[in-house]
Every structure is written in C-alpha cells, then in structure tokens.
Image (cartoon, grey):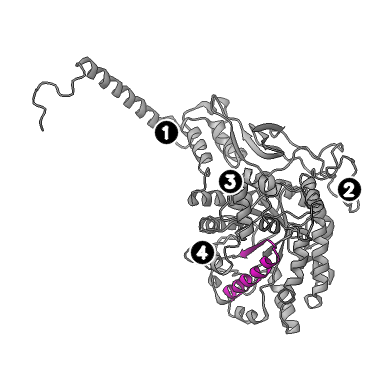
Amino acid sequence: MLAKGDGMSHGNGNGNGNGNGNGNGNGKKSLPTVGADPIAGLPAIDGFPASEKAYVEADDLRVPVRRIHLQGDNPPFDVYDTSGPQGIDPHHGLPKLRAPWIAGRLANGDTGNRSQMHYARRGVITPEMRFVAIRESVTPEFVRDELASGRAILPANIHHPESEPMIIGKNFLVKINANIGNSAVTSTIAEEVDKLRWAVKWGADTVMDLSTGKNIHETREWIIRNSPVPIGTVPIYQCLEKVHGDPEKLNIDLFIDTLIEQAEQGVDYFTIHAGVRLAYIPLTASRTTGIVSRGGSIMAKWCLSHHRENFLYTEFERICEVMKKYDVAFSLGDGLRPGSTADANDRAQLAELETLGELTDIAWKHDVQTMIEGPGHVPMHKIKENVEIQMKVCKEAPFYTLGPLVTDIAPGYDHITSAIGAAMIGWFGTAMLCYVTPKEHLGLPNRDDVKDGVIAYKIAAHAADLAKGHPGARLRDDALSKARFEFRWEDQFNLSLDPDTAKDFHDETLPAPAAKGAHFCSMCGPKFCSMKITEEVRAMAEQGMAAKSSEFRDAGSTLYAGSDDHHH
C-alpha cells in the first residue's frame, strides 16, 4: 500500500525549534555545541520539482520513496529515496525510526551479539530486513539468506536508530558512498552537516565522515544524529589526533577505546587497515606512487618504526568483540591499494587482499558483518580481474571500491575518470562504489563537488544495474525515453537524476514557457529534429497503411487479383 507523506517540492529549512528532539518529543537541543551555534546559517535543502515523499506501507513498516508526478494521464513514477525525513530541525536530529525495534530485540533474549548477521544466522528476520526487502523488491527470506551467508551487509549500529535500513551486496542494487569531513586546514561543523544533507538529497546511500581536523567527535555527533543513511569512519584518524600526529605512539588500547567511543555515537561501519602487514610494506618500494592510503601509510609507519606486526592484525579478534556488541560492520581497508594505473594489480595489493580474505573468515566466526575495500587506480583491462580475485579470496563478501580511476591524466575531472571504472566494476559484481569528486588529488570537496561526485556515481551505479539485468532497473530509463520521444520536456527534466541542471541547460537557449511544448530543442531546431521527423514518418506510414487497408476492402478483400491461378 502506498501513502502520501511530506511534500518534497519545497525546502525543508532548518526547522523552527518545534521538532521532536531525537524522536522522544522532549524538544531539547541534545547535540553538542562548540562555541556559538555550530550550524548557524545552515542553508535550506530544496526538494525536487513535481515530487513528494510517499511511503510503501506493509504491516507496521513505512518505507520511503520519492514520487514524481508526470504530465497528462501518465501515472506517477516512484524512485528509491535516500533523503530522509523532511522539515526536521538539525539541532534535534532525526526521529529514531529503529529505536523500538532495537529495544524489542534487546529485551527478548539479548546474547551480547547484536549484529544483523547474527540474527540472520539464527533464522530471525528483523524489521530492518523486512524494510530492506520492500526497498529492494525482494522477499525478506532472500535478505536474511544473503546476510547469513556474508554476501550482503545491512549496516545498522544499535546507537544509530535514526538510520533507514539499506543493504549492500552484489545481488541488490549497486550502492554509492559519499565522503565528507573536515581537514586540519578547512571546514566547519555547519559545512559538514550541509554536505551530509546535500549528499543524501542527491542519492548517497552511505556517507563516510573522514574528518581529520578540529572537533572530530562533535562533528561526527552532528552528522550521525542528522543522517538517515549509514555512517562510516576511519577510526585511526582520530587515534592519530589523540597522539598529536605521531604514528609511533599508537597502540591497540587507544584504538579499542576510540572504537568504543565512535560505536557509542552510532557509527555503522569502520574502515580498519588490518591487512597492512609488516612483510608487505617492502613490496611497495618500487611503486610509482608508493602507499597512497592515509590509514595504510599510518600503519606502515607504525610497523616499520617498531619493526612489529600490525596490531590491528594481531588483535583482530579483540576488535571483533567491539564490533558485534554494537553491530558495527567491518569495511576492511585496502591500505596498499594502487595510487596509479602503473601500480594496479601488483603483488602488494593482492597480498593485502589475501589477508583480508583471512580476516573475513575470522569476522564471520564472530557473526560480524564484513565488506572489503578495493582500488583505486586500475586501467579498464585489469578491472574484471580485481573482482574475480576478491570474490574468490573473500568468499563473495561485498566489494566496496573507490572508483577505480581508469587513467591518471585528468585532475579536475576524476569524477569522470573514476565513474568509468566504477560502472565497469559494478557491472562485474562490486556492491558499493565510493564516489570521487572533481577535487580528488587537488583539495577538500565543497558542496558543489559533493553533488558532482554523487551524480557521477549514481550514473555509474545505475549503468551497472542495467548491465546486470537487475529487475526494474530499466523502468526509469524507459519512462524518461518515452517522455523524451513525446516531447514532454518537464517530465524529461523531472525523471532525470538532476532536474535543475537539465532544465537550466534547455532554458539557456529556449527559455520561453511555450518552448516546453515545442517538438524540438536548440540542438536541431524545428526542421532537423529526428524524433519530430520520426513522428511524421510514423503518421505517414499509418495513413498509408490505412489507405492500403481501405483499398484492399474496396477490392473485395481478395488476396490475389486478376487470376484464378494461385500457384507460385
């Protein structure tokens, strides 16, 4: 059953202080302040034109979709929606959608292992699994089976009840991640909360907070409380801040304390570079670009400074104990990923991948959800091999890749160089694509860069879904193509990933309202539009066929005229 919800064709503003707190109705500002109001002046996020939030209702669940209203007698079109509840004051955070589900499980025989994989392996179908099944148009049992096998993960920390459940796995829609976060050089809490809301508006399925600057804890709290999607982090970054930037002072106790701190806040998945082993570091010596992962380089320096094995590897089971208590998923980091096409698929990269396969087995022994991070920079002819090796070594645990960039010659356009590789690697079976923005290798992304990166990766993910033959993937393409052929300009804009840009480009040369009904655009004009000519050809053909049909009937409907000999 479908139900209408909040309108989406207007801005959600900053709220007016009358929100429901964190879903508890107390109306108090529960988020930490750093000096003055840290999100003062936060801009409104406008909705999409001709769209509204609607809900698919089943039993006690209400699963959001964005409903696009089309012109004439064309039925509305529903699309997957990541934007979260509208009209909420960010000072209070989003409603705690999952709080009663979590409380019910904890009250009903809590074993201390709260992971969705643990429940799935015990034959339990959680509300989160049912929610995801509706979103993905599959059965709850299929979701449970994919989670139990490790082929999919459902990131859902028990302390992030605001999240709307989603799933990452090769047998589901290809997902995308957007990276945000401050640096030691620039950005504020307000800018990062704005980037979060901007990213999920345009379709980010998860968001990683990669902050390395000031107020890391407070920034993360504001992001999590206002995020309807899972949040990931790289905990070693905050550990490094705690030791004032000296990797040699890192240790497992500090790391575990930081994991607990972030898990208590509600982080849904951790990137942990446990595969950067001491013996692999020399393998990078002859590389063109060495070690390009921040986390990988930090752990490599620690290993060499102490000439000891990576403590994230040796203490991995201790880390698992934290993960399963909160249901935080592993995103096993590719700290030795290639940073140039010259280094793709080398021994360092593949040696680390083998270790990630070993660690996946250990995580699964603890029923901890696990995905595997991948490269990076890989030329097109080497992409398929990456997926095939990962699937074999890591037993089909979800693959989560950065791009990959297929060429290194286009700084400023790496959202394009990487989206090419992302579409290919998604087609071959990668479950989630980490976006790259135009600022990659050049600077910290701003909100415009975030949008460009998300749109590029929504294209890549959707192209992969089409190539995989995912059920229903082509429906939006067909709806937009039909609108295009019928010269329903507004519908063509509104069915696109970025209606504003599509409309602006059209209106640069034909801004008049009457142009929205024209059977041509400025590319071809009225005389050379192939679709207009096709319409005319079809009309002529139909008229010709009608005339021939009439002629046939007038001749007495005789198949052979003028002869009684019907033999060839």
| Mark 3 residue crowding within 10 angstroms, few (<14) / some (14–19) / many (20+) | some
Q: Are marks 2 and 4 in contact (CB under 8 Å)?
A: no
Q: Which mark is residue 383?
A: 4
Q: Which mark is residue 456?
A: none
Answer with mark 3 or mark 4, whichever residue precedes in sequence: 3
Answer with mark 2 or mark 1, whichever residue precedes in sequence: 2
> Disc 3 to disc 4, how far (Cα)?
29 Å
Give the residue at mark 1.
531
Q: Does dot 3 land on a helix, a strand or a loop?
A: loop
Q: Does dot 4 land on a helix, a strand or a loop?
A: helix
| Mark 1 residue crowding within 10 angstroms, few (<14) / some (14–19) / many (20+) | some
Q: Does dot 2 land on a helix, a strand or a loop?
A: loop
Q: Which residues are magenta?
A: 348-373
- Between circles 3 and 4, the one closer to the viewer is 3
- Between circles 1 and 4, the one closer to the viewer is 4
Q: Which mark is residue 30?
A: 2
